[in-house]
Image (cartoon, rainbow, N blue to C red):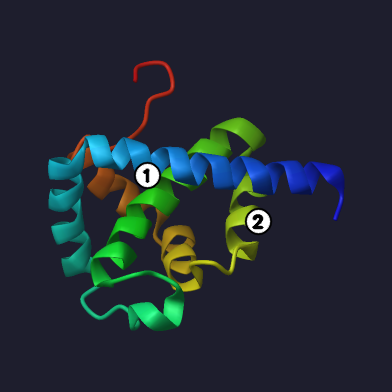
């Protein structure tokens, strides 16, 4: 693996964990967004099959992984961010939804004021 790819993967992991801290500080908004995501995706795969800890965690990772993609887009560019997300098998179903429904999930996060503004937060 080229060094740049390795650096980008490490960056993605770092961002992912930092975003978990962000959503913990915005738990009420996160819960409201999750309720909306549950309506959009009423039948997710069993969490044990897709690497999440619970059904709640599956929906939570739709938020976290979308925010991770958005941050990577700003830092390494859209094409590389999307390719990196597509290659990540940790949350395969979640990442497939994030990549296929980027605008729709983003609209949910925007409605609940969960978009991270690097210049404002």
- Residue drawn at the location 20% of the way across and 47% of the way down: 30
Dividing the picture into quadrants, the one containing residue 98 is bottom left
Q: Report helix, strand or loop for mark 1.
A: helix
Dividing the picture into quadrants, the one containing residue 41 is bottom left
Percent position (x, y) of residue 79?
A: 65, 47
**For mark 2, what is the residue?**
83
Name the one closer to the observer, 46 or 36.
46
Percent position (x, y) of residue 113?
A: 22, 34
Q: Tell me if residue 9 comes above or below residue 117 in the rendering.
A: below
**For mark 1, what is the residue?**
20
Q: Give the mark count.
A: 2
Q: Tell me if residue 74 comes above or below residue 28 in the rendering.
A: above
Instruction: From the viewer's perspective, tell me whether residue 76 is left or right of residue 49.
Output: right
Percent position (x, y) of residue 104?
A: 31, 54
- Residue drawn at the location 18% of the way across and 43% of the way down: 27
Callout 1 crowding tier (Cα within 10 Å): few <14, some 14–19, many ≥20: some
Name the one closer to the observer, 47 or 92.
47
Report the quarter where the C terminus lies: top left
Dividing the picture into quadrants, the one containing residue 47 is bottom left
Of the numbered discs 2 and 1, the one sitting upstream in the chain is 1
Q: Spatial distance from mark 2 to mark 1, Cα to Cα?
A: 22 Å
Please identify, in this view, whether the residue under mark 2 or under mark 1 is nearer the observer: 1
């Amino acid at each position: 693996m080229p060094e740049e790819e390795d650096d980008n993967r490490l960056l993605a992991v770092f961002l992912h964990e930092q975003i978990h801290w962000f959503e913990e500080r915005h738990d009420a908004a996160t819960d409201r967004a999750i309720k909306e995501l549950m309506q959009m995706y009423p039948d997710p795969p069993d969490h044990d099959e897709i690497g999440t800890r619970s059904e709640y965690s599956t929906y939570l990772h739709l938020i976290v992984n979308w925010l991770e993609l958005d941050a990577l887009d700003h830092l390494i560019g859209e094409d590389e961010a999307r390719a990196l997300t597509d290659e990540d098998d940790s949350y395969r179903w979640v990442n497939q939804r994030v990549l296929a429904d980027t605008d729709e999930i983003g609209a949910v996060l925007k409605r609940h004021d969960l978009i991270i503004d690097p210049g404002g937060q």
